[in-house]
Amino acid sequence: MRYFDTAPLYGLGKSEHSLGHVLRVNGIIEDVVISTKAGRILKPASRSKRAESLYGINWIDPLPYVDEYDYTYDGIMRSFEDSQQRMGVDGVDILYLHDVSGVWHRDSYDLYLSQLRQSGYRACDELRSSGAVKAIGLGVNETASVLQVAAEFNLDCSLVAGRYTLLNHQPLEDFFPEAQRRGIAIIAGGVYNSGVLAEGSKGAAAVRTYDYQTASPEILKRVEALEAVCGEFGISLATAATQFVYSHPAVTAVVQGALSTAHVEANVKAISEKIPPGFWSALKAKSLIPEAAPIMTSAA
């Protein structure tokens, strides 16, 4: 495990502080790949706008900040420099522009995209040219914005969460082919669709979620069908979910979260456990995954 993804938003600065501390204490900063994100500036929270409830996300003991969007040149530079200080590093391997997305920003999307066009991308390009970052891309929960931004700017990669999973196959049709044509490496996040593909149809309600919402009866029915085939072949749903995503040649890496040592061990098992012969064919025979979906018999 050598790749660590973080962001100013995560724990409102705490994630970057914690990651930098752990890497320094263990003397492995030079041995790992680090990505962080830009597009948000952290500012002190007020009593009327508490950090703990920002976006409805209940961070565990977050730092006392709130974020403000800023995709301008100055905003990108400040965000990156703040991240350098929090982590105690002179650079990172990947800098993602966080949530440059019409799905996320809605009516404000054109405003923030305009900031990126006018000056924000120039900041990213300068950071890449200077060697402070090795690659730039988007960190988003949808695919359309990646292709839209890539049509105007040179992206090396993008972190896309929850869009290609055992339950969501749409990127096979247009996104992956275009990303490959443009040479954009895809880092896949959210391979469990926020919980239901990790905990299954019988998991606790808090983690039986799809795209951060309670999974619908239709989704649970599909999960039950996937679980049945997994049971026949003696593998976990999490293993199938992880290796399905990693099988696609457009996907360079899979990013998984963990709250405990047990989660880390489960993630390692999910990517390394051997898939029995015939498993993927069984899923295709039941139309649970597309016939065209690339698969592998075991993790590389």
Image (spheres, rainbow, N blue to C red):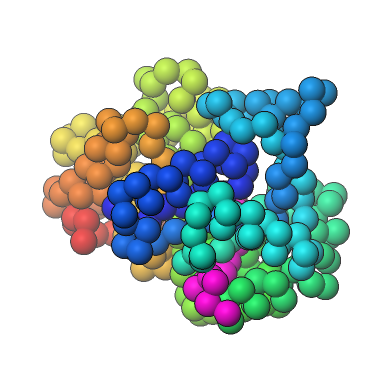
Residue lying at 26% horizontally and 49% vertically, measured from the top left: 271
Question: What predominant SS class does the magenta segment belong to?
Answer: strand
Q: Give the number of callouts.
A: 0
On screen, residue 174 versus residue 167, left or right, reads right
Relative depth, front residue between 27 and 68: 27
Residue lying at 65% horizontally and 26% vertically, measured from the top left: 52
Residue lying at 74% horizontally and 54% vertically, measured from the top left: 102
Relative depth, front residue between 76 and 141: 76
Percent of width and height locating residue 71: 76, 60
Is 65 covered by the magenta stretch?
no
- Looking at the image, can residue 119 be seen? yes
Percent of width and height locating residue 234: 16, 35
Above or below 62: residue 8: below
Is 134 covered by the magenta stretch?
yes
On screen, residue 63 versus residue 242, left or right, reads right
- Looking at the image, can residue 223 be seen? no
Above or below 275: residue 58: above
Percent of width and height locating residue 169: 47, 53
On screen, residue 219 versus residue 136, left or right, reads left
Percent of width and height locating residue 197: 39, 35
Q: What stretch is highlighted in magenta?
A: 130-141
Indicate the quadrant containing the C terminus: top left, top right, bottom left or bottom right. bottom left
Residue lying at 43% horizontally and 45% vertically, measured from the top left: 21
On screen, residue 7 versus residue 193, left or right, reads right
Above or below 206: residue 18: below
